[in-house]
Structures are given as structure tokens and as C-alpha cells.
Amino acid sequence: MAPYPQAGPTGTDFTSVGVQDMMKLYYSRLFPTQEMAKWLAYGNDSKHPQSDPSFFPRREFCFTLDGDIFGGAELAAALKDRCPSKLDIGPVYNVEPQRRAAYQNSAQGFVPVERELVFDIDLTDYDDVRTCGQGGHICTKCWPLMAAAIQILDQGLRRDFGFRHILFVFSGRRGVHCWVCDERARKLSDEQRSAIASYFAVYKGQERGVAKLVLTSDDHPAIARAYALLREAFEERILPQQQLLEEEEVRKAVLAYLPNDAIRSAVRQRWQGVHGSEARWEALKEEVEAEAQALERGKKGWEARAMRRSLKAVVFACAYPRLDMEVSKKMNHLLKAPFCVHPKTGKVCVPVRPEEAYEFDPDTVCTVGGLLNQLNSSGSAAAQGEEPWRATDMGLAVDTFRQCLLDGLQEEVRAGLARKSRAAAAAAEAGLAF
Amino acid sequence: SKPALSMYRALPDGEIAIEEFERFAMDRLRVLKGIEDLKVKGFRFDQMEPKILELYEQHMGGATSEERHRKDIISHFVLRLAYCSTDDLRRWLLAQECDLFRARFNQMLADEQVPQEFSEELREKLLQVLMSLPGVKATAGMVTADSFYKVPFEQVPDLVASRRVYLQAGFAYVSRDQMSSLVIQPFRAALSKALTVTARRWEVVVAPGEADRLAPMVQSLSRRYLGPDFSNREVDDDKRPKAADIPRLARESFPLCMATMYDALHEKHHLKHDGRLQFRLFLKGIGLPLDQALHFWRTEMAPVTPTEKFTKEYEYGIKHSYGKEGKRTDYTPYTCAKIVSSIPGVDQVHGCPYRTFNQQSLRSALGRLQVSPAKIEEAVGKAAAGHYQLACAAAWEGKHGCSCDSGINHPNQYFEESRKALQ
């Protein structure tokens, strides 16, 4: 089978059915409720003495049902009953969310206790640097921007912050979400989350047609590492696929990063005899390097460095991840759950493996209609005792989910419970009330 | 175990004798004024650090660490009382206390530092981070095992947010300066807030009940001069100056303020009241005995003052200064602070010439005092900047040809240092 769930053959029944009408079937036959519950329980669903049965009920779930919003959950039953068009996950609170009103004005208040560190990247934020479409558009030409973002985030979160349980999810229409599920990440304060988001922030909006970039003249090691990744992605995928230097608008925007008018006219001159974005980029690089060397010969080392840095600025402006900072900053932010179905496209929010990010094809992500067709045709071919959906593309998606997140998480969860047991035993010995 | 460096968050408990109350505060004040002096002299913080610690040892030392700790806390809080009442005072205390805290904190860090294992690769990355910081001239020598601290990234969110630290596997590598800043910011903020709160509460709660006891002492602390007071000198009679010595002594060792007054007295045979008071207390301070003082003044004023007038109008005043009349208080010679703050009117010559003279007059006066030209310029410059006592010290250096480490805080101190240098 192809590495990612592909849409099945167009069936007679389901691909012509409205998305919302399929939701009941989706939640009763396809949605991996068991895996999701196991994930979000973080070990508190077991018979282990230290498991806390109040933990899962204190998690906030938000169902969107044709515009209405509900809260709190007994997840499986509620999903089947209500068939929300959208499912959002919030933090774990100190008490069950349904009892929010009673606690809000009390001494302890109604406060979030833990929550995954999350990131949200949306292709709409890259409209100024993509030529294949705008707004809700997504395709294989602009997907590499997301792939690059996934890899940079993944590297940074693992190497710099030491996180290990990270899940990237296609957000259903035009971007990706990232869920960092380590216990250490779940316990972060709002301030710490904000700091991590800032650590990854380089692009800070536009000013007079040029991107505002937070870059120093010598790079922080994390920025240098990101640049290495970006440069390759930019030159080999993004630039060629977007043909960025074809349109005059984008060309002008790119030239705006160069330090002076002289180099800009020199480059325009070169471009007259050159076709295709790759060739234009090479020409641009050559002119910039030649000018930098001339400056060096003229003992203008500082200007030479600024000249070379301008190329770097172009790459960062065109390709560095543009995070939605607000999503990451606050514990109580609601974020769409993995395996939701997008109400307009019917596409399922499936996990994406960072090491295969560039191979992911947003155009052929499995849809609820396609999956139901697969269920129909493969139902009888299912192995004995195995649930039918595991033979569909959903099975593949859930496998990815397990490999990227769930299996690794179990170890941390087991270690956490064992630690709590030891602490309880020590406290009991010391005669403390527990 | 050693008590940790205090951040003065909790009010001290227990009883304290009022004498200790005052003495502790004065000792701490000596340290803080010493810090201010160092700054005015233009030292960078890293140059100041060892001197600050020396000052602290000198004035705030104690037999046991508990005693030192107690003195530290109590003196800090007493000074809060003394320096909370106006914006200027609060700012002054905040500035000096933060520098003191920073120096002591750095010392504590250095003492507790456990050298880290640094691989070449890590060293390179740390240097890269240093190089990326704006305003820092990074050199390989700045990355040593004892100049960085490894802390969980959660503890330094500001540094993480601005990418000012190297992160690896969840740890941030914080440089010593960054570490200090992290602790000093909250210290400064807390102290600043505490001072405003203290000011409000002091007036409402403490002052009425303590008006007689504590308030005067606390209020005077912020104006106190802290050096020797040059009174009651125990000097052998034959070592004391005589009236006849004064012209020579004026040329050799009087500070400008006193030399000016001597010249005026000698020329006009008269000084107005404030000048007389300032000058005769100074003369008492250099050891001039009462009978010599009477002789001196009588002689100098003779051309315009008949003897009976002198006896009736001026002799009483001189004896009064020596504590032989009236309240019989042995008055102390004026400090520079006091002299600087007194502004002479027309026909008066008291006060501090570095403040009252214009640049031209100052230059020629210093020339007459035989100060070297380079030092004249330095003194004029310092006087123009408002650093009158530093100007006087510069003049002292220019006259004696050597440096004046102690600075000038008192005219008699100028005189004594001068006599020492001339021996």
C-alpha cells in the first residue's frame, strides 16, 4: 500500500453523501476512540493503585455540533450520541469542566492543571510567498513549506528541549498541528509556553512589503541549524515548485532584501538573460557573492557580511515556520483533536511522520467517504476478531499514531505511576498523612 | 551551614538595643557611600567588585556568621526607614543596595560553582551563542567551565524566549552575567516597591509613637557624615600649631575654602559671622589651642578692631566654639557636606569655592595655591560637573604631587593628609 492512506475508489454511496451525514457512522465505526482515550488518560485509566480516575473526566472536550458548543465528556458515548462536526481538546482542569460555574469564584477557582504543548501552523499565513494559490488552498507545491516547518520544530523540540513524545497532525484543510505530550511539557506554565514559542519565532509579520525577521548578525546555533534545513528545502523544493521568481511581485519582494540599489539593478540585469526560477536564484547568488568579495577586497568586511546575510534573509522570509503564537501561549486554548474530519473537505486529520514529511500528499489524504467505501468493500475480508476499520487506511493512520506517540508514551506513563507508588510508600513509612 | 545571601524579604524579629540599631546602620552606610564613591570615580562594575567586597568585610564583618547575618538584615531595614522618605533618597539607596547585592551574589556564585564538563563541541556552541548576542564582544576566553551554569530551561523563560542561551536536551546554559541579572531584576523590583510601602507606613504607623526616640536618629542618618570629626584631638602641646604658624600652614596645607578665608581675613582684617564660625572651627580642628586662637584672631583683626571691641564682641564667640562658654558644647568643625550647602552672600567668603567661584576665579585661586596646571584643569572640570569634593581632591593631588586615595570629605582631613604627605 502507499505510505499514506489514499482515497479509495469512488464508491457509489459515500462520496456523494454530505460530510455531516456521515459523522454518525464515522464515530461508531472508524474513529479510533480507544487509542485516543488511552492517549489522553496518560495512564489514569488502568487498575494501577496510583491511577487517578478523576483525571480523564477533568479534561475539557468541546463538541461543535452544527454550530452549538458543548463541554465535558464521557468520550465514546458522547461522540456516538452527538456526532459533533468538530472535536476540540482543552486542558485538564482541577475539577470536571461541567462544574466550572460552582468553582470559578471559590478559593481554589477553576484552573487548568496540565495540557500538552501545542503548535499550529497554517498555510494561509504564507500567502505572500506562495504562487500556487491563496487562503484555504493547499497542494503538493506549497506543502513543502509545512514539511520544512515540521522538521524544524521536531528537531528543535527534541534536541534543544529534550521532548520525546511529539505528534504532528494534518489539520484537515491547510496546515499542521503539533502536540508535545511529555509530562514535562504538559506541566509548563503559560509563561514557559510563550517562551518556547518565541524561541522558535523568527518571522514577525510584514513591514512595507518586507518580512520582519528576528535575526542577529551571528546566528544562534538553533537558527544556524534551521537555516541548513531551510536552505536545502528552499533550493530543492520550495523555489522550483513555486517558481517564485517568475512573478514580478515576488521578484520585487525578494530584491527588497538586498542591501542597496546597485546590487538590485545588477541582479535585474543578469535576470534579463535567464529563464526559470532556479536559474534566477543561482544568478542572484552569484551576483551577491561577487559583490561580497569585491567589498572584502575593498576592506569593507562589515558590508560584505551584510550582503551575504541578505540571502539568508530571503530564505527565512520565504520558508521559515510561521507559528500562530496565540495557540501555543495559553494552557486553556482549545485545539482540534487528531482524527477529526474536516466539515468541508471530509478529510481526516491524520498524523504525519516528520521523517517522511515531504512525502505526505495533502491532496490524497483519506476522506470519511473514502474510508466508508473501504469499510464496505473490505468488511468481509477482515481478519478474525479484528475490527473492520483496521483493514482500511484508518488502520495505517492509527499505526502511525501509535508509532509516533502512543507506544513511546506508555513507557513514560508506566515510569510515572511507579514513581508515584514509591513516593506514596515513602510517605506512608514516614508516617505522613497521604 | 552558612546562611544564604539575604534578599531582605522578611522583616527582622527580636529585640535590638538602640545603640546597635544606630551603629549597624552607620556601618552599612559607610559601605554604601563607599560604593557611591567608586562609581563617581568612574570604575566599571567588574573593577569595583573586589573593592565592594573589601568594604563590606571591613565594616560589616562579625565574629560568627549568625552575627554577620543579623547585622546585615537589621542594617538594611534601618536604612530603608532612613532612605524611604523622598524620591531622591529612595533612588540612591536602591542604586547602592543593588550594586552591593550584585557583588555579593557574584561572590556567592563563584564560591558555589561546580565546574562543568565541557566538551569541545559544547564550548563551540556556547561561543556561538555569545557571538549572537548584541552588544557582547565574544571571545573564546569567555567560555570557561566556571562561567556557565546548567539549569532546566523552565527556570529561565526570558532567556529562552529571546534565544540568549544555548539549549540542549532541556537544559539552558546560562552565563554568569545572565544569572546575576535574573536574580537582580526581582531584587531591585522588590526593594523599590518595599521602599514606597515603607514610606507610606512609616508616616502613618511608626512616626507618632517613635517621634522622640527613633525618628530623629533615622532622619539624620541620611544626612550623616561618617568620618572622624576632628574634635578633641589628643595632641601633645608642643606639636600643636601656634598662631605664628598659620600663614605657613595656610600656604602649605589649607584646602581652598580655608585658604580663601585666611586670605580674606588677612587682607580685610574681618570676616562676617558665618565665615568666622567656619574658619575658627577649622583652626580648632587643626589643633590650634584656645589661647593661640585668641591671639591669632586678635592680631588679624587688630587694624580695624580696637581691643575692647574685640573682647566684647568676638572673644566670647571663640571661647564658645571651644566649649568654654555658654552650653559648653565642644563644637565640631564643619564637614565638606555642610560647607558645600552653605551659600555665601555678597561680602561673604565662606562656603565651598568649587561651588561658588566661577571657572576663571577658580583657576587663578588654584594657581595661587600652587596646584599643577593639569590638576587645575581637572579640578575645574570636576567642579563644573558638580563634584566639588572630587575637585578638591584633584587640587590636593596637584599640590602634593601624589594621589589622594581617600578622597576629601572634610577640610581638616585635607589638612591632615597634607601634613602627612609633607613629612
Image (cartoon, coloured by chain):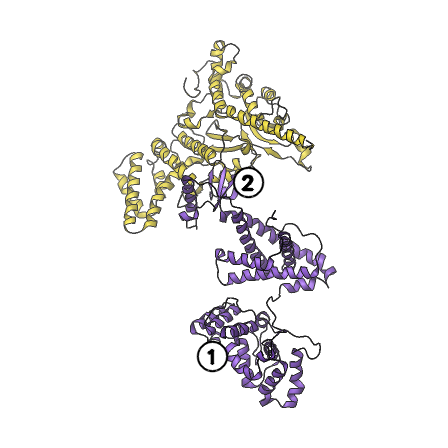
Chain colours: A yellow, B purple
Instruction: Locate residue A38: give its quadrant.
Output: top right
Q: Nearer the viewer, residue A131 or A396?
A: A396
The answer to whether any part of residue B82 appears in the image is no
Question: Residue B342: percent from the left, percent from the top?
Answer: 59, 73
Residue B113 picture location, percent across and down: 51, 46
Q: Which residue is mark 2?
A: A191
Q: Is residue A322 above or below residue B295?
A: above
Instruction: Point out which mark residue B241 bears.
Output: none
Q: Are marks 2 and 1 on the same chain?
A: no
Name the side, left or right, on which A413 lies relative to A98: left
Q: Is residue A94 left or right of residue B263?
A: right
Amino acid carrying label 2: it is: Glu
Q: Mark 2 Cα within 10 Å, few/some/many (few <14, many 20+)?
A: some
Q: Chain of mark 1?
A: B
Q: Which disc is residue B368 wearing?
A: 1
- Closest to the observer: B331 or B195? B331
Mark 1, residues whose alpha carbon is within 10 Å: few (<14), some, or many (≥20)? Answer: few
Q: In the structure shown, which secondary structural element does the residue marked by tag 1 occupy?
A: helix
In space, the residues marked 2 and 1 are separated at their CA atoms by: 67 Å
Out of A392 and A41, give the one closest to the viewer. A41
Contact between labelled residues 1 and 2, with CB atoms less than 8 Å apart = no
Residue B174 visible in the picture: yes
Q: Nearer the viewer, mark 2 or mark 1?
A: 1
Q: Secondary structure at mark 2?
A: helix
List the single residue furthest toward the right.
B209
Amino acid at the residue labelled 1: Arg
Provide residue A119's location: percent of width, then percent of height: 50, 33
The chain carrying label 2 is: A
Counting from the top left corner in percent of width and height, residue B389 is at 53, 69
Viewer-nearest residue: A398 or B366: B366
- What residue appears at the point 59 percent right and 58 percent down from the top-left corner? B93
